[in-house]
């Protein structure tokens, strides 16, 4: 059961919503004819409602196609339109948990994101998914190869040169203007392995926390922005929380899920879940610095494996970093001796953090810093990890981000931040380099003076 959070501004949301498990073991789930019957049913409901028009490009694509059809009804749509709608959905879940009035327990039982997922799965199983998209979902493989010293240098040069970008556009249809991540040879795993063993921390459990956490570093956090994990470790240890890196982890499976590769999701789950559950059983909590990865373990895997006890164990024990810190604060276990005020902070909350329904914990934590104001931005950045880098979607992604960018550009803040580093890079691009976007974990470390 999901409950609307009072901290967030979602007046339109129902007070209580229900999420049914994904029915992916049912053979009918993969039947293309039955899929299109359900697409038509749901599209008709959305056509009559249109509350989600401004969320992303999915709904304008659908509604404009209906309005331009001969009879103005869903029945007149070509199936090409259905697939265009599916392609524009990046499974942010915002329409389900924030806007839709027809989700269960309503008899329409509408779950738009899971219907889009079902369509992506059918498409993937028919081998209609692009090679480019399959490659971008191989985050472990790409990260390991791109972190090899010589390879890393070559990849970064190609990704950040005009000639290299033209090559990527011609071969993989990666938009020439999209921001691509840097790959580090000195990964998070390598950095933390070099640290001296912390032996002075006296672990103190709280009401909802054990005081020692396993850090699920994530692919992006390990290979692309390892400073994010470093900052997390410094902050947690500064607060008397013991941290160990989950060194034998693999990708959480979210890129595979968004691709429709359920076999890939299962493989990631079968590897990660037993290892994480064992650490929980040994008395550890879990944190991950990327909202999408936390959401994968908190929501998507439990909806795929609702009866798996190990999945449930991990679900109950994984936390967003600021969620964990605020639980510690509730037990008076958070260090609030800050050395530096932050002034005015403009903070963007990513979609995959909003839909966790934990409230604005990042904002609440930053507000503990003296002489600090926080302005919250809830609009989507339009990034989604891969959507914004694809040739056919990049300009649309920037259009989705425009309301957020316009509001942020008007604010004269001292700091600009987002919990999602990929969203942060997208925002920086949209603001044309006039404002750097800093991770809230980094802001907190700065405030601590550590």
Image (cartoon, rainbow, N blue to C red):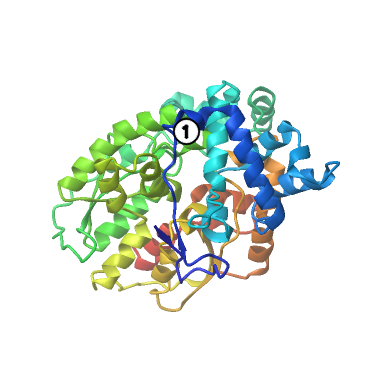
Q: Position of residue 449 (x, y in %)?
A: 35, 65
Where residue 2 sits: x, y (%)?
42, 59
**Element class at badge 1:** helix
Mark 1 sits on what residue? 256
Image position of 331 (left or right of 409): left
Q: Residue furthest bottom?
A: 371
Q: Residue 386, can we see it?
A: yes
The N terminus sits in image quarter: bottom left
Asked if residue 215 lies left or right of residue 91, the reply is left
Q: Image quarter for residue 348?
A: bottom right
Q: Position of residue 125 (x, y in %)?
A: 53, 23
> The C terminus is located in which quarter?
bottom left
Image quadrant where residue 83 sits: top right
What's the residue at 62%, 46% (across, down)? 42
**Image spot of residue 358 (x, y percent):** 40, 62
| Numbered label tally | 1
Q: Nearer the viewer, residue 359 or 236?
A: 359
- For this rendering, which residue is in front, 119 or 233? 119
């Amino acid at each position: 059961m999901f409950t609307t959070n009072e901290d967030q501004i979602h007046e339109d949301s129902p007070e209580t919503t229900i999420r049914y498990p994904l029915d992916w073991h049912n053979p009918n789930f993969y039947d293309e004819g039955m899929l299109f019957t359900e697409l038509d049913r749901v599209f008709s409901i959305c056509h009559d409602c249109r509350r989600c028009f401004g969320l992303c490009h999915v709904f304008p694509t659908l509604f404009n196609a209906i309005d331009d059809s001969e009879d103005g009804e869903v029945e007149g749509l070509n199936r090409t339109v259905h697939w265009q709608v599916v392609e524009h959905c990046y499974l942010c879940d915002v329409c389900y948990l924030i806007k839709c009035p027809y989700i269960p327990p309503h008899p329409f039982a509408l779950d738009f994101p899971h219907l889009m997922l079902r369509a992506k799965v059918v498409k993937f199983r028919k081998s209609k998914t692009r090679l480019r998209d399959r490659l971008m979902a191989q985050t472990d493989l790409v990260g390991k190869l791109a972190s090899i010293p010589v390879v890393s240098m070559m990849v970064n040069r190609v990704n950040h040169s005009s000639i290299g970008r033209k090559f990527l556009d011609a071969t993989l249809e990666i938009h020439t203007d999209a921001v691509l991540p840097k790959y580090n040879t000195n990964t998070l795993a390598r950095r933390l392995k070099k640290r001296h063993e912390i032996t002075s921390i006296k672990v103190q459990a709280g009401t909802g926390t054990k005081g020692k956490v396993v850090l699920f570093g994530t692919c992006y956090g390990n290979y692309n922005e390892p400073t994010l994990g470093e900052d997390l470790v410094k902050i947690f240890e500064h607060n008397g929380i013991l941290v160990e890196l989950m060194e034998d982890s693999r990708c959480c499976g979210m890129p595979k899920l968004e691709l429709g590769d359920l076999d890939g999701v299962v493989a990631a789950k079968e590897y990660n879940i037993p290892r994480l559950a064992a650490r929980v059983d040994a008395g550890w909590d879990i944190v991950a610095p990327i909202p999408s990865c936390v959401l994968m373990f908190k929501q998507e895997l439990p909806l795929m494996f609702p009866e798996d006890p190990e999945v449930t164990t991990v679900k109950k024990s994984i936390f967003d970093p600021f969620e964990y810190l605020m639980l510690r604060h509730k037990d008076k276990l958070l260090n609030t001796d800050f050395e530096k005020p932050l002034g005015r902070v403009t903070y963007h909350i990513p979609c995959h953090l909003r839909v966790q329904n934990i409230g604005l914990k990042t904002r609440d934590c930053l507000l503990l810093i003296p002489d600090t104001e926080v302005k919250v931005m809830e609009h989507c950045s339009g990034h989604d990890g891969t959507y914004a880098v694809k040739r056919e979607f990049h300009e649309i992604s920037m259009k989705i981000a425009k309301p957020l960018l316009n509001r942020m550009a008007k604010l004269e803040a001292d700091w600009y931040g987002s919990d999602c580093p990929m969203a942060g890079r997208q925002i920086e691009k949209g603001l044309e380099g006039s404002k750097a976007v800093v991770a809230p974990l980094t802001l907190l470390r700065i405030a601590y003076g550590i």
